Image: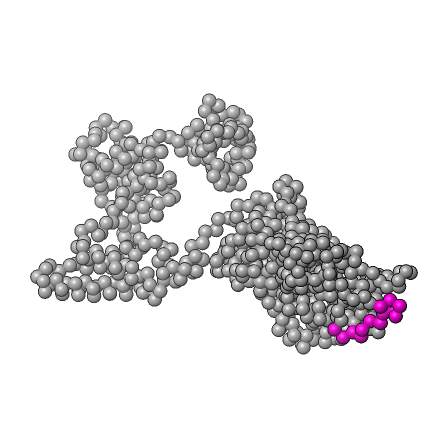
């Protein structure tokens, strides 16, 4: 058909636009030379839409449109109802041959009836005509050395039934379909006792030992023999044993899924009969996310990244012993990676840390720290989070965090990877593209440069693995065309859909600390609460303390921002700031490095001015990757015991005081006289300013005291 040839679509034709839109030619609108006006069929409010001939041709060629001519004709509709099929293509080959043979008899009879007035529909005349037709259908050109299958001519009564069905159902060929599909009730004439034993042995086939049909039939035969022996003693007639084919037919009528599950196990049945529905119905960002982890083999990764020659055999053996777990969260609508972390073990702590990374609205600081050229703006709370049945995801601690974020948790059973196919495909992409396409040689400086011993090369590479994976996710994956997005990149999909739908607000730092912070117990006194060598103080907790006295309180601590803690007071979390502002927004890693630096430089000092500590923190931050610490291997939330050990190591041997003033020469502030020291010498105070005794009466307590 040339491109300028009009497409004929009758008024009784059905037009299907895939996957499920059904239309017909609009009544009262004749075919226009330029095309047709089609109207939806299965809608309450019919919608009219015009289609040009070129558009119809293009859609048909692309497989997007289908035209079923005469679909709404009364006879054809009756034929479909009578035959139970829409076309002959739905029949078995053997059945199609029978229908074709019947059609030849019927159409030839009708042709002769129309051209010969002597052809009538009496039984005698029908029989004569059928014999003539049968003779004409047998070919005389067949070879004598080859067998020929010849069917007998139908009887007049049988042919009359064919003819009636053909004419009644619009002269449709499918109306000649044999009714044999309704036959086959081999049990109706069977003895009730035989039926009972047959059903019992049909169920026997559904056994985990997987007996064959022959084995089950032998057992059925033995049961029938025992039954007949008992009936013989009672003088009753013997029962006929059902045929093996009858047993087989009854087994085939069982639910296929249940049979397979009984014989092979439920997981195998679920995998075999899983429906690939084409994906989840998701259209906006953060509507549905999936989380999973993937094993990383570093000893293979060094070769894939093109730096394998730099590693000795000893290095490779060391890398071979390291098995990292990459935990990631992706957004299904945009395919963006929302969180990514590496750990040497697959546990709930790594999963919780990945979840915390997901709800961060902007991770560009991590991307820049990893050397990425692009930003990482994806994040936020999701509507639904799907995970597999791994212990790290069904852990109560992990699920409680999901609940706190007001997300719906869906647990895909183990072995059902198709229910989390998006995250599985991301890991597959990570495995192939990180190996084949990502410019891994850009990381060769990690092992080629640096003032360290050659034997430390493997350790340096292990520590740099998070940087490699972050750069792959942010710079390569997010900016590569994605087949699941129609060729759009995940980054552009995120920008487009967030502009259209927006994203739910992320938890603020205080909410993050309450949800993800590690819980510890600390003493509350006049100085507030102390965590990792820092005091946290507020009027709210002191007001509560004045009513209940000194007490031990629950504290939530976030290692990513040690400037505040959350204290449980009067059935609520209260955000309490540190009395030292220079730690606001700082990571615990930066604070511990600062302490080590100060201890080294001021080992002989008992007191250090606060401005010196602040300058040290800024210097440490300049050389420390605080952002990368959030995705560093095994650097997850510290436990309460680890915080206790950190506090012990942070007993400086000196006090942090405000800068001295001209009036007193002594630093002021609430910490001027106290940071307990484990191994420090007692501070030497000026003799003219003896240390006042601690006032136990706190009725007039204030931050200015």
Q: Quadrant of residue 123?
A: top left
Residue 651 is one of the magenta-drawn residues: no
Image coords of residue 483 (percent x, y): 59, 49
Image coords of residue 505 (percent x, y): 64, 46
- Classified by dominant secondary structure, the portion drawn in magenta counts as loop
Name the residue located 71 percent from the left edge and 71 percent from the top edge: 648
Viewer-proximal residue among 702 and 284 = 702
Viewer-proximal residue among 210 and 375 = 375
699 on left or right of 52: right
483 on left or right of 213: right
Name the residue located 80 percent from the left edge and 75 percent from the top edge: 681
Q: Which residues are magenta?
A: 678-690
Residue 682 is one of the magenta-drawn residues: yes
- The answer to whether 629 is drawn above or below residue 286 in the figure is below
Q: Is residue 120 visible?
A: yes
Image coords of residue 354 (percent x, y): 62, 58
């Amino acid at each position: 058909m040339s491109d300028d040839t009009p497409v004929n679509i009758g008024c009784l034709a059905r037009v299907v636009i895939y996957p499920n839109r059904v239309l017909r030619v609009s009544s009262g609108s004749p075919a226009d030379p330029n095309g047709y006006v089609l109207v939806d069929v299965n809608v309450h409010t019919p919608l009219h839409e015009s289609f040009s001939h070129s558009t119809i041709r293009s859609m048909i060629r692309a497989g997007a449109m289908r035209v079923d001519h005469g679909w709404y004709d009364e006879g054809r509709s009756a034929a479909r109802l009578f035959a139970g099929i829409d076309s002959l293509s739905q029949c078995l080959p053997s059945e199609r041959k029978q229908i074709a043979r019947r059609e030849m008899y019927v159409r030839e009879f009708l042709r002769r009836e129309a051209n010969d007035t002597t052809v009538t529909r009496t039984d005698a005349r029908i029989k004569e005509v059928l014999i003539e037709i049968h003779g004409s259908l047998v070919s005389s050109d067949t070879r004598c050395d080859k067998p020929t299958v010849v069917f007998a001519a139908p009887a007049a009564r049988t042919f009359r039934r064919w003819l009636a069905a053909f004419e009644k159902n619009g002269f449709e060929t499918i109306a000649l379909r044999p009714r044999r599909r309704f036959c086959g009730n081999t049990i109706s004439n069977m003895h009730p006792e035989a039926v009972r034993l047959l059903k019992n042995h049909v169920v026997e086939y559904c056994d985990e030992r997987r007996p064959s049909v022959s084995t089950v039939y032998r057992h059925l035969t033995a049961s029938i023999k025992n039954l007949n022996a008992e009936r013989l003693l009672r003088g009753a007639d013997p029962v006929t044993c059902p045929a093996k084919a009858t047993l087989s037919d009854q087994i085939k009528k069982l639910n296929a899924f249940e049979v397979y599950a009984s014989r092979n196990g439920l997981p195998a049945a679920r995998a075999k009969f899983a429906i690939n529905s084409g994906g989840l119905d998701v259209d906006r960002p953060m509507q549905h996310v999936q989380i999973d982890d993937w094993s990383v083999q570093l000893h293979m990764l060094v070769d894939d990244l093109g730096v394998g020659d730099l590693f000795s055999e000893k290095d490779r053996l060391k890398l071979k012993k390291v098995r990292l777990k990459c935990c990631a969260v992706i957004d299904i609508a945009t395919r963006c990676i929302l969180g990514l972390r590496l750990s040497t073990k697959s546990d709930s702590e790594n999963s919780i840390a990945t979840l915390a990374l997901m709800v961060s609205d902007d991770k560009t600081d991590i991307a820049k720290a990893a050397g990425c050229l692009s930003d990482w703006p994806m994040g936020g709370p999701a509507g639904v989070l799907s995970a597999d049945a791994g212990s790290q995801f069904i852990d109560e601690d992990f699920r409680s965090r999901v609940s706190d974020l007001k997300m719906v948790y869906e647990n895909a059973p183990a072995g059902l990877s198709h229910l989390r196919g998006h995250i599985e495909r991301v890991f597959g992409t990570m495995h192939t593209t990180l190996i084949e396409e990502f410019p891994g040689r850009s990381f060769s400086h990690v092992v080629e440069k640096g003032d360290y011993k050659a034997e430390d090369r493997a350790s340096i590479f292990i520590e740099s693995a998070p940087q490699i994976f972050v750069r792959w996710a942010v710079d390569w994956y997010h900016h590569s065309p994605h087949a699941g997005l129609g060729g759009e990149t995940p980054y552009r999909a995120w920008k487009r859909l967030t502009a259209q739908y927006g994203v739910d607000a992320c938890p603020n730092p205080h909410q993050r600390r309450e949800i993800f912070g590690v819980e510890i117990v600390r003493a509350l006194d006049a100085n507030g609460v102390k965590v990792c060598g820092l005091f946290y103080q507020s009027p709210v907790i002191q007001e509560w303390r004045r009513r209940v006295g000194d007490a031990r309180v629950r504290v939530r601590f976030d290692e990513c921002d040690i400037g505040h803690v959350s204290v449980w007071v009067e059935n609520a979390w209260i955000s309490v700031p540190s009395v030292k502002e220079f730690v606001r927004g700082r990571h615990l890693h930066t604070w511990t490095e600062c302490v080590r630096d100060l201890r080294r430089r001021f080992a002989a000092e008992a007191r250090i001015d606060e401005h010196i500590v602040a300058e040290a923190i800024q210097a440490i931050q300049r050389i420390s990757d605080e952002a990368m610490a959030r995705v560093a291997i095994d650097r997850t939330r510290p436990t309460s015991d680890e915080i206790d050990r950190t506090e012990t190591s942070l007993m400086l041997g000196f006090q942090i005081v405000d800068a001295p003033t001209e009036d007193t020469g002594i630093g002021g502030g609430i910490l001027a006289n106290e940071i307990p020291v484990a191994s420090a010498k007692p501070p030497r105070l000026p003799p003219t300013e003896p240390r006042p005794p601690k006032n136990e009466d706190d009725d007039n307590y204030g931050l200015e005291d």
